[in-house]
Image (cartoon, rainbow, N blue to C red):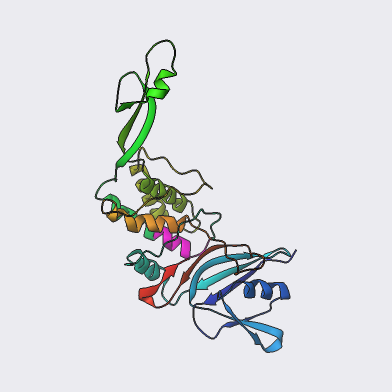
Amino acid sequence: MTPDLTLTVQETGPGTPYDLTGDQVAALVAVPDLVRLTPAPGGRWSVRGNQKAGLVRLRMPSGGAIHLRLRPKLSIRDLLFLLSYSPTDPWHPEPVTAATADDLLPALADLLARTARRTLEAGVLHGYREVEEELPLIRGRIRTTAQLRRTGLPLPIAVRYDDHTPDIPENRILLAALHLAAHLPGVPHPTRLTLRHLADRLHGVQRPHPGLPLPPWTPTRLNARYAPAVRLAELLLSGRSIQPEGGAPVPADGFLLICRGSSNASWQ
């Protein structure tokens, strides 16, 4: 099996020469616009950034993987701070598959802690959720069909009602991210304590099952104060597979930030 290769590439600059095998070159070239490759002296390849930042793992068909660390011009904390206040909606949530110990993720965990604390200072958001259950009294509306199927005693009664609860998608996503961030490698102890304290504030909220899609939510006037925290939570819980247009897919996971200037950055 081909051993794993770690490449650290700056977002911009002249590039760094590496000794690459044919399979490694093919894997990098197969993903359009991820990095730029040019021949270098001594049979090596110069790997240059292409206005992207983030962490990506490319798994090669012959075995092994390429771990790409695409570092931005700005510091990680400054970059994430700007993104958390982006006027656009550049976030694309998808289920997580892995996390990598790198300075990006501890910085993201710290930013999530600060953003979630600011969000929850105004209180935990509640919403209405439709509930169906059987009760010894009438609450809401009777589920007539379900009640008629019952035999024997008329109690309990099958009812349907709207419950005002904190167990809504926004809080579920935030809780899942707080738990994940508290267990990331490299996160300072004070940040871990803050993350756990914030998770305890979401009492009555069910955490999404790991590996399942996150519950959908829609930004509205009512949850506007939650939006920065939920988007950061989705980012921490997100991963994406990259594949070229046409041909066989190239398995990969991680996340990328396309940098088109500070005011026009977007996550993929």
Residue 19, by quadrant, is: bottom right
| Residue 266 higher or lower than 92, as above or below | below
In the displayed image of the protein, which residue is found farthest to the top? 152
| Residue 109 forms part of the magenta stretch | yes
- As rendered, which of 222 and 184 lies closer to the eye? 222
Q: Residue at x 39, y 30 (%)?
A: 132
Q: As displayed, is residue 103 above or below residue 194?
A: below
Number of numbered tags placed on the structure image: 0
Magenta region includes residue 67: no
Q: Tell me, yes or no, if residue 188 can be seen here.
A: no
Q: Quadrant of residue 91?
A: bottom left
Viewer-side residue, 86 vs 10: 86
Q: Is residue 242 left or right of residue 92?
A: right
Which residue is drawn at the image coordinates 68% and 83% (left, top)?
44
Say if residue 62 shows up in the picture. Answer: yes
Where is residue 219, by image quadrant? bottom left
Relative side of 118 to 95, left or right = left
The magenta segment is 101-110
Does residue 227 appear to the left or right of 101 in the view shown?
left
Residue drawn 57% across the image and 77% down it: 35
What x and y, as percent, mark residue 139? 29, 25
The image shows residue 226 at horizontal and vertical percentages of: 31, 53
